[in-house]
Amino acid sequence: MLRTLFLIAAGGAAGSVCRYILSSYIKVLYFPGTLVVNILGCFLIGLLAGLDARFNLNTNLRMLLVVGFCGGFTTFSSFSIENMELINNQKYFTAFAYISLSVILGLAAVLIGIKITSR
């Protein structure tokens, strides 16, 4: 258990640093860095999920790369793969609700947070 937590933490730290560097570089080009990071993260988690399905990746490697690195790089990749699993399992309403509620409630939570702290 401690080893798994260490692997997730190490991967998460590396992913966070990569997100910061990439986002900072892209912002210099006047483009939303988070969009690019999110799409790259989705592509990477898709590649890793495909590799895992094909080759049954080692659990430690999966924890390091999928949960740790991708989670630190962007949680949007986790959100996206969870929705793909729902869609693949034909749980369309649940996927639609998850996507809709995540966007609507996420924006509402940001707005409420700003309103509370800007008084």
Image: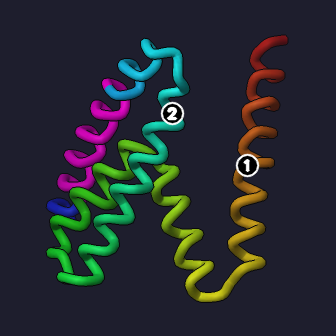
Place of residue 12 in the rendered image (x, y in percent of width and height, measured from the top left): 30, 45
At 40% from the left edge and 49% from the top edge, which residue is drawn?
41
From this viewpoint, which residue is outermost toward the bottom? 89
Residue 116 lies in what quarter of the image? top right
Of residue 116 and residue 106, the one placed in the foreground of this image is 106
Three-letter amino acid code of the residue under disc 1 = Val
Which scheme is used to colour this image of the protein?
rainbow
Left of 75 or right of it: where is 99?
A: right
Segment colored magenta: 5-21
In the rendered view, would you say 115 is above or below 15?
A: above
Q: Of circles 1 and 2, which is in front?
A: 2
Place of residue 3 in the rendered image (x, y in percent of width and height, measured from the top left): 15, 61
The quarter of the image holding the N terminus is bottom left
Of residue 49 and residue 17, the one placed in the foreground of this image is 49
Report which residue position mark 1 lands on: 103
* Residue 34 - label: 2
In the rendered view, would you say 28 is above or below 100?
A: above
In the rendered view, would you say 17 is above or below 116?
A: below
Of residue 36 and residue 81, the one placed in the foreground of this image is 36
Left of 34 or right of it: where is 14?
A: left
Query: How far apart are labels 1 and 2 at the CA level?
Result: 15 Å
Left of 72 or right of it: where is 94?
A: right
Left of 58 or right of it: where is 92?
A: right
Membership of 11 in magenta stretch: yes
Residue 8 lies in what quarter of the image? bottom left
At 59% from the left edge and 88% from the top edge, which residue is drawn?
89
